[in-house]
Image: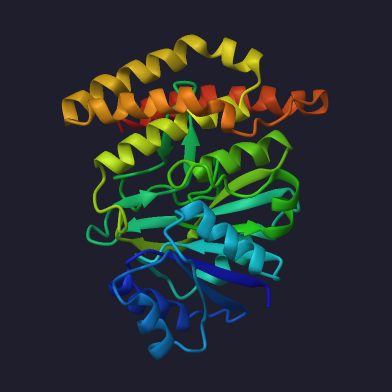
Amino acid sequence: MKVTIIIPNYNGKHFMKPCLESLESQTNKDFQILVVDNHSTDGTIEYMKETYPEIELIALKENYGFSTAVNVGIRRAKTPYVILLNNDTIVDEHYVEEMICAIEASPHIFSVSSKMIQMYKPSLIDSAGDIFTILGWGICRGSNKSVKQYTKPDSVFSACAGAAIYKRSVFEKIGYFDELHFAYLEDIDIGFRARILGYKNTYCPTALVQHVGSGTSGSKYNTFKVKLSARNNIWLLYKNMPPLLLLINAFPLLLGFLVKTVFFYKKGFGQEYVSGLKEGLRRCRECRKVPFRIQNLPHYILIELQLIRYTFSYVISRFY
């Protein structure tokens, strides 16, 4: 087997059938499926045991969050590659084939992001990989753009973990998904760590995935998601940017946080956003900071240039 497909689940019983049926029709069958359940209470465990007894199921004793669930799956896997797949997805029949081909294109690739399409608005993109900016914003590249765009393979800052393939051996070098995050921005964090060591994260436009979006959290903006994302944003920066890089980016980062504070107050989630920032600052010492090594200096320089480029490309994309 080349790939283990890891599906984290929390009360997503209604998503499982269409997701698993789409995997049954793959042109490349060189994979196994592993479902990691975060202590669901909707009957998912019983449903999986009765309907899909051939699929390995790990039932956790409580809801540990996305990061812990996928880490359990990655550590259980024995294949060279792992695909992380949200339960609220339906993949194209060539999905696995295209993802394997993309990650085997270079030994320097750590992850590959797929072309995620909005399930209920199939003319629009959900994500074409993640980018990160000098404003401290993690952005789903191509979100709400026409599916006719983003048709070429490209470099991205990190893969969107909702439907991405990873080289399993690299986790031993950069660490696994940060379980302190629980959920949100953990994919940008691990993509950042991979880049610090010189690995690449890319985008495959021919690996197509339909995605409901916010299938577990319930909505694009909610108290839980806004607070955790704000907290994790602080940790993401603290862990991955050495002091000099934080100093260089201090003004744009402060500007970015100010703009988002105003944005979320207008959306009615301002207090939650500020509360998340405060928690992030208060607890950042609990995070494991990536140690600065002089041999990685060229990678940091490249990362800074990419952050600047992604910032301008994001601004330009807002008008086209």
At 25% from the left and 39% from the top, the residue drawn is: 223
In this view, 32 is above or below 270: below
> Percent position (x, y) of residue 166?
62, 57
| Residue farthest to the right, as pictured | 295
| Residue at horizontal 61 percent and vertical 45 percent from the top | 201
Q: Residue 301 vs residue 259: left or right?
A: right
Q: Position of residue 270 (x, y in %)?
A: 24, 26
| Image color mode | rainbow
Residue 266 position within the rendered picture, expressed as x and y whole percent measured from the top left: 17, 25
Q: Position of residue 311 (x, y in %)?
A: 45, 25
Where, quadrant-wise, is the C terminus in this rendering?
Answer: top left
Using the image as rendered, state which of residue 312 and residue 189 is in the foreground: 189
Asked whether the viewer can see residue 164, the reply is no
Figure label count: 0
In the rendered image, which quarter contains the N terminus? bottom right
Q: Among all residues in the image, which is located at the extreme front?
A: 61
In the image, residue 13 sits, relative to residue 244, either above or below, namely: below
State the residue at coordinates (65%, 30%).
Answer: 289
